[in-house]
Amino acid sequence: MTRKTRFARFWALILLAVLAPAFASAAPFAAYVMDARTGKPIYAQNADTKLHPASLTKMMTLYLAFAAIERGQVRLDSQFPVSSNAAAEPPSKLGLRAGQKIELRYLIRAAAIKSANDAATAIGEGIAGSEQAFAAQMTATARALGMRNTNFRNANGLTQEGHYSTAHDMSILGRRLFYDFPQYYSLFSRRSADAGIATVSSTNKRFLDAYRGADGIKTGYTRAAGFNLTASAQRGNKRIVATVLGGTSTAQRNQIMAQLLDAGFGKAPSNVREVRPEPPQLLAQRVVRKAQVQPTAAATQPRELTLASSAPPQRTRRVMKVAPEAPAPAAAAAPVATLVETAAAAPVAAGRMALASSNRPRLRPAARGEAVDQAVRMAVAQDTAAPQSASLAAPVLASSSRPAPAPRSRNAAPTPAPVQTAAAEPAAAAPASSNRDLNLNSSRAPKPRSETVILAAMGEGDISPEAVEIVSRPPAGSRGYGVNLGRYRSQAEADKLLLQVALQGGPALEGGRRHVANTNRGFEANFTGLSKASAQLVCDRAAARQEPCTVITP
């Protein structure tokens, strides 16, 4: 007998001994076992048969809620209104009232742990606007995840025509919850939680307590579907995901699931390369509104357009006036005009436009000063008297005195050179010095430098701004406190802990902000923006659970 034959007979014995009551039940039976590390099947029975998923539907409702939180569409503390449709859902329910508002975190806890139908409907309506629109998003997401035999009509899983799935598809969804949202996955292993208006208990508590390594995921029951369960468990480096549809009771369903998981752990290889699923290609829906304009009768009638010939535009004439080559001395003082543009007078025809001539813009006042006019007059006069000069600035430079040379020794007196100009009086003659040598020996030694520091006055443009010290003060209401929940090796671990504490923190963490600090020693998980009393309460609860927690003061 081969090994494959022995394995097939082993499965047959399990099915005959354990699954026999399932064949006699009204609901068809189906099962699927998967190696969660690779997504490969281990066992399948009626795995692609379309059956009622019951409350396993809420796995997709929660998947879309987690996705909306991660992309910033909603937050855990977003207030969701409760419609009369959601409040009227049959049990299991949280007890919501029409018209009230409740935070999304409480709706998630109630839907995942208690399997509350009213909470699931409120989630769908709050995210998509209506349960029908949300069901369409659920089906589209199922297609993106590879769930090819699934169609959703509501957010809670109550029996409805056209609402179906398979054991294979529900196992795919359970695996995607584990890999796509690990920061929220711990929610499915909780035995109880605060749901805002009540404390809810898990519908999967018996199996979680009875099976070693189980950490989720979701139960479901209706008369048409029977007792359903999608479970996940880990032992060592192996993780198995399995789904059972159509159980006859909670105990029988849990017993079948335990047998399937045991066989899965025995069949799955010990060492295998983990193949994480690719992120789903979810397309964002864009709403484009087009304006509807009713055309008028005049706009719809055909019209004939005839282009009439028109005369070409009239061209303007440019007249250039050049100053004479040798202007008279009297005319040299006037401003020099080089080019003047004028528009020739032309008759203006009816229906046409001609560009009128405009005056040349005036020079700025600074350019019409006496200094400029004086320089121009001197340059023109010098050009007439001495054509050999190559520079217009020569007359100006000739009328200025050269600076006197600095003395080269203590015995030599400065000898300024007298220059005769028309604008200045002749300088007095001074005795010339014959000693032009640089006599370093005749100079005195410099005085010792004083140690006194003299601060010169600084102008307004030299004053540098002083450094501005920014002082952070705690915000109003004394909410500058926080808590530190320890240091972790990765940011994912710190995020997971912060989310877990946020989901079970209740009112103490309202208004708090999650923050992971990347330090040299690791990633620190912090809550900030808390009051002193709230921070102390969070640490007291952590101390009761023997978990690290430190209050951060402002």
Image: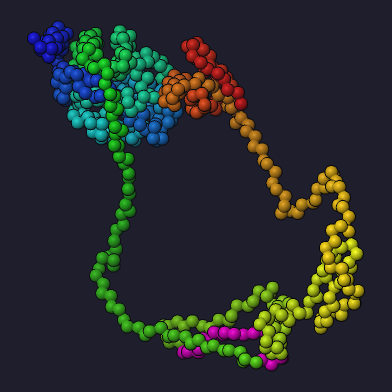
Residue 27 shows up from this direction = no
**Percent position of residue 263, x then y:** 21, 12
**Residue 335 lies within the magenta run:** yes
Residue 252 shows up from this direction = yes
Q: Residue at x 27, y 33 (%)?
A: 141
Image quadrant holding the N terminus, namely top left
Q: Residue at x 77, y 52 (%)?
A: 458
Task: Note whether 168 is above or below 143 in the view shown.
Answer: above
Identify the main secondary structure in magenta: loop
The answer to whether residue 52 is left or right of residue 401 is left
Q: Residue at x 48, y 87 (%)?
A: 317
Task: Note whether 240 is above or below 287 in the view shown.
Answer: above
| In-front residue for pair 394/354 | 394
Segment colored magenta: 327-347
**Percent position of residue 208, x then y:** 32, 11
The answer to whether residue 23 is left or right of residue 492 is left
**Percent position of residue 98, x then y:** 38, 27
**Percent position of residue 254, x then y:** 24, 11
